[in-house]
Image: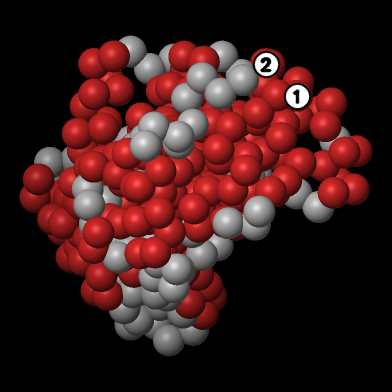
Amino acid sequence: MTAPSASKLADLIALAQEPSSAKRRELLRGVTDLFFVGAETHSPSEMQAFDGVMGALAEEMEHEIRAELAGRLADAPQAPQRLVRTLAADDVGVSGPILARSKALGEADLVAIAKARGQGHLRAISGRSDLTTNVSDVIVARGDDATLGVLLVNPSAPLSREASEAVVDRAAENPALHDAVVDRHDLPVDLLNEMYFMVEARLREQIMSRNAALDPAELEAALAVGRRRLATRDGALPADYDQAEAQVRALRTRGVINPQALAGFLRRNERTKFLIALAELSDIDFHTARRIVDRRELDALAIVCRAADFDRALFLTFAVLILEPGQAMARAKEYGQLYADLPKDTALRTMRFWRMRRTTGDVAAA
């Protein structure tokens, strides 16, 4: 260490004994000025000396002074490691800038803080530009929905497959997360399609647009991964399921289960038969069919009918019978246009995700 630097450090160490706030502020500025002047050329021994002095003094400084110091060090290309870690573990009023920006913190530091501290610390970390999947995983596991929202809108925050699944599960309970989840360009496509039944129309359009742009290889890879996830249960089967399924099976054996027969089931209010037959003819599972009909998801029903080659008139018949009479008649033209505007290829791509449930045995296990 050069003589001037050694002399300056000696003076600063002496100043550390001063109890007054004014002297402590002078100490802070003296130490940080010493560090920032020629910081890139400090030798390892000088850096170690600065770190030792500054780290020891930080523990004795008032909150306001620590916060000022953290703000100055947050953007330093090289920063004293001990001091930065001390400030990063402080309350969030001090640690915020360090956690959000300091390059002196490595993955291990961030993981340790994310596991030990509160939501304020997690949110500060969530906006960093250099996050790793290990850090993101901890934030997803420990963060509340507000923290998760900060992480999701950060394009530099990578999510592992496990974290992505957890995010979709969380979004099922909180509509405030829907935009951020659907906007994630790295969200696996099978998980994106799970979001379809959770979100409003404008976000469904985004999902459909992404499906339309899928190349065959990406689609097959997404389907393969998605099949491994679909182990959840969608709810109990209706009480008349076994009887209705047996009757539909008998009708199918006689060759009289066709699209027109479905409309007859609806007209006679044989809802379970309709759902079983719709699932059969469109090759989706019973729970997905029930979700579409129970929620009156006409855009989803249009996808099913388009992919199954049901004609527009039959789709409109289903719409009229599923919806309230007044509502259906008033919006018949709109529904007809919805069906006409839907490309069959896009419908088929989306249906492949919905059909995954049929191949996983969910109905039999429910």
Whichever of callouts 2 and 1 sits on the residue coming sooner in the sequence is 1
Q: Amino acid at mark 1?
A: Gly
Q: Is residue 150 visible?
A: no
At which x and y percent is residue 129? Answer: 38, 39
Q: Is residue 7 left or right of residue 48?
A: right
Marks 2 and 1, how far apart at CA: 9 Å
**On screen, residue 97 above or below 338:** below
Residue 2 x, y percent position in the rendering? 15, 44
Callout 1 crowding tier (Cα within 10 Å): few <14, some 14–19, many ≥20: some
**Residue 322 position in % (x across, y down):** 70, 48
Image height of 68 relative to 34, above or below:
below
The amino acid on which the numbered mark 2 sits, given as a three-letter code, is Asp
What secondary structure is marked by label 1? helix
At 85% from the left and 49% from the top, the residue drawn is: 325
Instruction: Compare residues 94 and 227 and report the one nearer the observer.
Output: 227
Residue 184, placed above or below residue 294: above
* Residue on which the image places disc 1: 336
**In the rendered view, does 124 fall on the left or right side of 226?**
right
Q: Secondary structure at mark 2?
A: helix
Q: Pick whichever, 220 or 319, lies toward us.
A: 319
Q: Residues within 10 Å of mark 2 (few under 14, many from 20)?
A: few
Where on the picture, by quarter, is residue 280? top left
Which residue was labeled with disc 2? 341
